[in-house]
Image (tube, rainbow, N blue to C red):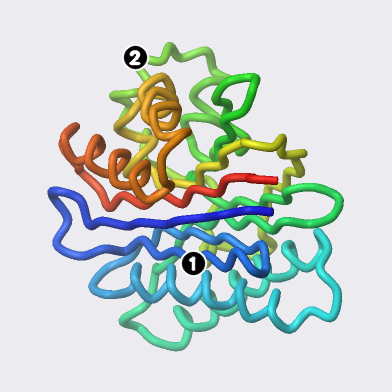
Amino acid sequence: MLEAFAMSDKGCVRSNNEDYCLIEPERGLYVLADGMGGAKAGERASRMAVDTVAEIVHAAPRLDSQVLLTAVEEANRRVLAAAHGDPLLEGMGTTLVAALDLAEGFSIASVGDSRAYVLDGGGLRAITDDQTWVNEVGRPLGLDEESLRNHPMRHVLTMAIGASTPLTVNYYSIALQAGALVLLCSDGLHGVLEPPQLEQILRRGLHGTLEESCRELIAAAKEAGGPDNVTAVLVRKIA
């Protein structure tokens, strides 16, 4: 049995919020997207991607890992089609991280750099790998972390919903212990708070409500400057 809560904030710098998320604990579905593009295009892309994943999952006669992958691929197709059909939406895209609670495990699909973490008896660890220049090019080249933090390519994604076809989707399946906490978040959170800070906040909230933890995470990101939209989805296994 899972419980969940989600919260999103435009942060301290951006005038609008291009993040979008959806939680449906009764279906075991949790989705988060961080849009990009001019005007309102980023908002359109993130919402379209999340809504498409939910639509495909809702329509599936049987839920399994393939349903989640199909849903993400369909989200990519629809965002690409919308961008090609309207010059005002040209170049729009979005990251996407989607989780589905299945009998065989907690399944996660990700595109871009929105992340999934899990906090359990083994501590806090990242489940997803960023599809970014930093992670896929900079680190393999041997650049140190300080150089990567200031590199002009540090914000460049190597994959995004709406950017290309075929799409490379990273897929993971984990077994959740009772009491385990899953965090899905946009880079407005993990980009300003280091893992030890995230873990400290999540541990403080283990005996409180998920809403309190979400509020504290977002407040900490904003206290650190809040340069981007910030979204947190928390899922806790309670049985």
Q: Is residue 23 left or right of residue 68?
A: left
Q: Residue at x 58, y 77 (%)?
A: 52
Q: Quadrant of residue 127?
A: top right
User: Are the residues flagged by discs 1 and 2 in contact, CB closer than 8 Å?
Assistant: no
Disc sitting over residue 82 in the figure: none
Tell me residue 209's x, y (percent).
41, 46
Q: Is residue 186 left or right of residue 70?
A: left
Amino acid marked by disc 1:
Leu
As drawn, 73 above or below 151: below
In this view, the residue in front, 22 or 143, is 22
Q: Secondary structure at mark 1?
A: strand
As drawn, 145 above or below 213: above
Assess disc 1: are there few (<14), some (14-19) or many (≥20) residues with their C-alpha within 10 Å of its C-alpha.
many
Q: Is residue 34 left or right of residue 72?
A: left
In this view, the residue in front, 184 or 167, is 184
Disc sitting over residue 22 in the figure: 1
Closer to the chain start, of discs 1 and 2, is: 1
Q: Secondary structure at mark 2?
A: helix
Q: CA distance from mark 1 to mark 2?
A: 34 Å
Assess disc 2: are there few (<14), some (14-19) or many (≥20) residues with their C-alpha within 10 Å of its C-alpha.
few
Tell me residue 113's x, y (percent).
49, 44
Q: Residue at x 47, y 30 (%)?
A: 134
How many numbered marks have been drawn onto this rendered protein structure?
Answer: 2
Amino acid marked by disc 2:
Glu
State the residue position of label 2. 146
What is the quadrant of the N terminus in the image? bottom right
Q: Residue at x 35, y 67 (%)?
A: 42
As drawn, 76 above or below 152: below
